[in-house]
Amino acid sequence: MKKQTPSSVLLLLFVFLTALTTAAQNRAQSTVTGTVIEAATNTPLEYASIYAQNESNSNIVSGAMTDEKGHFSFDVPDGNYYIKIDFLGFKTLELKNISVQGDTSIGVQKVQDDTQMLEEVTVIAERSTVDIKLDKKIYNVGQDMIVKGGTAADVLDNVPSVVVDSEGTISLRGNENVKVLIDGKPTGLANNIQEAMRILPAESIDRVEVITNPSARYEAEGGAGIINIILRKGKALGINGSVTGTIGDPRNYELNTMFNFRSEKFNFFTSLGYRDSKSEGYNLNDNRYIDPTTGEPTQRIYEYKDNNRERQGYNGTFGLEWYLTPSITWTNTVTARRNTGYNPNRVRYDYYDASDSFLYNRYRNEEKDGTRNNVDYTTTFEKKFDKEGHVLTIEGNIAQDKDNENAGIDDINEHLNQTSFERTFNKEKEKSGLAKVDYTLPIGENGNFEAGYLGTFKSTNTAFNLQRLNNNSWNVDSRLSNTLEYKENIHALYAQYGDRITSQLSFMVGLRWEDSSIDVNQIDTKSYNNKKYNDFFPSAFLNYEWNESTSTSISYSRRVNRPRGFFLNPFSNYTSDINFFQGNPDLNPAKTHAVDLGFMKRWTGFTLNASAYYNKTDDTFQFVRRIAGETENGTPISISSPINLATEHRYGLDITLNYSPFKWWRLNGNFNFYRTETRGDYTFTHLDGTLETQNFDQDAYAWFTRISSKITLPYKIDWQLNGMYRAPYNTAQGKVLGNLSGNVALSKDILKDKGTITFNISDIFNSRKREQDLVLPQSISHSEMQWRGRQINLSFTYRFNQTKKMDRKNMTGSPEGAGDMEGMEML
């Protein structure tokens, strides 16, 4: 049998989808049409949402959005329908018992201005909104042109208050202790969330939930809060979907498909993707070593590494929603991902003497390749009771992730005319499970009670092995080899209640209890460590609506941040033998008290959303660098590691501004300013067994800002531009330098809005990198790191049986609340 190539498999897939599309178009459908206008001006209302629900079966939903002339059109089976017309700032228009027997026009419908505009929705940009609830904000990715052809990391880096630095580290309001979830649950790639965000394509993401101060409903993990990524899953009636292809420079070939088929009894949805990419970056370390007793320089080593990575990845999601009864839905979803990578790293060392005179070069060439396979299965039962909002959800999940990475290293020393050979083997296998029950019960007119259970179970085995060739025999370096076993079992119970005290004042209080049992075992050294603890995590929210356009809120929660993955693993990379990262298996969880004071004000075309916050974290994580011994030829070894410090106080102000000066121009800005006060001493144990104590008391100010502009040019060409500046800030051991970066994109709809062409440039000035100066007793260094340079992409999206402006409510994920972290809305 002839082996199928990736391109042939994708071609067969496209033919299959095309055949299904043709079949769907041949089915007997009736078309509902109409026009929506503003009652006050009799002008067409563009982007209004229209959706229809079959009155005899609530599972049949379809709809559309109005075009620039206020027209809309969508297909439904014959029947009686309830039709709703909705647009921000206008009263919702409801039409009941609309009979559809063949093509039907509902004529011209007028909508009235709504002076009682909801406080819960703020427009950021066309197709990109912020839905503000009592305990979270939801950022809809929409038609964000900047992230076309990108990854989840690119999406997150465009979300206000969120920053993804050049190393892939995710921070929320400047705090890296953030928990990232996918569809409301931990990802199977949680041990390396940076890698997970680089694997997940942007095209698969529907929206991002940012929860800066989570309620008791959410797991207590994440001192800075929670970022929940909701993946796209089709919900529209009939057969529909989209195909997106991307080409880019440096090499970036992508093909992503979205497809769903919905009937009265079930909804089948799938997404498939393929990516072949190459990225180029670099690492730089300029180390000047000094004698700690005299302060005189001893030598200088300039290290430069090319960060070249080639990746090829496949991902597929298959899901089925089965409507067992009008009130019971059973959803099953399977996701599989496979990624292969090749990293040819080249490291050059320039050696200088104490007077900065050049001595000689050394080269270190690493050929690294790896594979990663991930499988994830989720099953969800949802029962809706007679009263609206009365819901029981039961969810189970199992996942497995395997990662194998091998490297061969040639070390060439021109000065000594020597070449040495090393090789590394890094294998990681993780199994995880989840059991979850959520129950929501409305009480009275405005009250809402929620309770539930969450159990998470994880087992990870990571083996890193370094070998050196000596006399034609490979010998293991036991100092830098290790097998780490990590086991985690967490059980949690929660309950929370919210209600409205007056027409203006509402509240929500909750309590969560978590019991944790964690094993961190180093098999090679026979070091076994079990940590058992349980604790209560309370939360409280109070919201006051001063008037229709102004509200304030105050909230409190207690959080925990558990170290995982590379934080704990002593060794996982050996590209450089004098500068590398080393995990700390003795790390303890950090616990945070978080207080948040929020304010929101809306004017015509302008919205201000501000938050003042305070976090107090005990046993906070701190990344530090130290000199930890020497190589065989006497070169100092610099190691970066996470440690527990005593206490960190963080005060901040986070402001988001949304402004639409004209219908064709939308602006969004975000500004975050914070101060950190860190106190603590730490004693290091060097590789040679000696001890050293350093003081890490530090007070520092930091801020970053982001602005995004979207303009509709003539001929309906959309132009999007955004920029970000992160100001310099001090650390306990030095200073992180400021950084300015920008992105630009152009987009044009074609083929009667069924197709869209998008051109974007990520990191226009090729400036997005992390620069840091460090001052240690034994060295002064300057480092730079750029994970990926400038990227240019050209994308084309084709939609079948749907339009670009199709109502998002008909295109978002799972059944209401399933897999989504639905919390309590503002009462």
Image: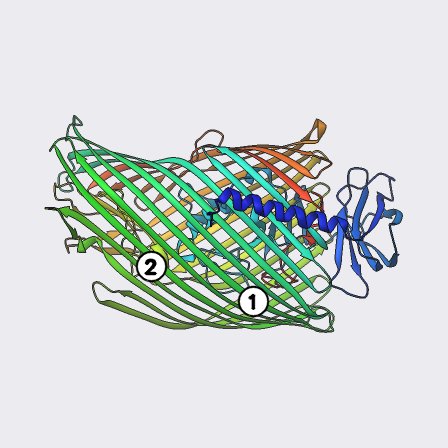
On screen, residue 395 versus residue 385, left or right, reads left
How far across and down, in percent of the image, does residue 605 sit? 71, 40
User: Callout 2: helix, strand or loop?
Assistant: loop
Residue carrying label 2: 646
Q: Amino acid at mark 2?
A: Ala
How far across and down, in percent of the image, does residue 611 sit? 56, 51
Residue carrying label 1: 379
How far across and down, in percent of the image, does residue 536 sit? 46, 72
Q: Nearer the viewer, residue 6 or 75?
A: 6
Q: Amino acid at mark 1?
A: Thr
Disc 1 and disc 2 in contact, CB within 8 angstroms: no
- The quarter of the image holding the C terminus is bottom right
Q: Nearer the viewer, residue 618 or 366?
A: 366
On screen, residue 557 versus residue 548, left or right, reads left
Tell me how many marks there are: 2
Q: Earlier in the sequence, mark 1 or mark 2?
A: 1
Label 1 to label 2, Cα distance in Å? 42 Å
Q: Is residue 135 visible?
A: no
